[in-house]
Image (cartoon, grey):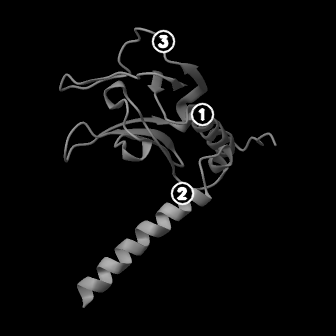
Amino acid sequence: MQAAVRAGVLQLVGVVLAARALWCPLRPELGEMAVEVTDKVRSGHQVGTPSWALQDEVRVTGREVVVVLRPGPGSAIGIGVRLDDVMDVSVRPVRPGESPWVLLDSGGRYFAGEGEVVEVRHRDGVLVVPVCNAAVFAEVIRSRIAARRGVPTRR
């Protein structure tokens, strides 16, 4: 009986999360709120995969931008930049023949594929992320930084 109740609750949680995603699509105003904002990361080796099935993601938390890559079953790699270290956030198209945006210690390479990337310029360099919704996600990052610094955002 308890197992059936747990299974029902887990299914309900999935439905609630899916409905929430439909009610609150990715938008710049999310950067002003104290919530973690997530978008999917696409790479060249995932061409044709629907965005909901992509495993890699980028998150904006209250303190940092974190890219989480899942190169294999049971493995995850995080790349982070503190928001206090960010100097600029921009969006640009992928350049033909561009180098991989990530080189893994294991030798794996992630290429951006087609579309746009978010460039996060920070004190130690540049983090390039091929986000599914690049323009909006860049605005979320900018809004989060402005909110952290107490700068009013434009309306």
Residue shown at 62% from the left, 43% from the top: 144
Vertical arrangement, residue 69 with respect to residue 123, above or below: below
Q: Residue furthest front?
A: 48
Q: Which residue is mark 3?
A: 95
Residue shown at 49% from the left, 17% from the top: 94
Q: Earlier in the sequence, mark 3 or mark 2?
A: 2
The crowd level at tag 2 (other Cα within 10 Å; few <14, some 14-19, many 20+) is few
Q: Which residue is mark 2?
A: 21
Asked if disc 2 and disc 1 are in contact, CB closer than 8 Å, the reply is no
Q: Quadrant of residue 55?
A: top left
Q: Residue furthest top?
A: 97
Front tag of 2 and 1: 2
Vertical arrangement, residue 33 with respect to residue 96, above or below: below
Q: Residue furthest bottom?
A: 1
In this rendering, would 3 be left or right of 14?
A: left
Amino acid bearing label 1 = Ala
Whether residue 124 can be seen here: no
User: Which x, y percent locates residue 53?
Assistant: 36, 45
Q: Earlier in the sequence, mark 3 or mark 1?
A: 3
Marks 2/1: CA–CA distance: 19 Å
Q: Which residue is mark 1?
A: 138
Vertical arrangement, residue 150 with respect to residue 117, above or below: below
Q: Quadrant of residue 135?
A: top right
Task: Assign a secondary structure to mark 1.
Answer: helix
Amino acid bearing label 3 = Arg
Task: Assign a secondary structure to mark 3.
Answer: loop
Task: Assign a secondary structure to mark 2.
Answer: helix
Amino acid bearing label 2 = Ala
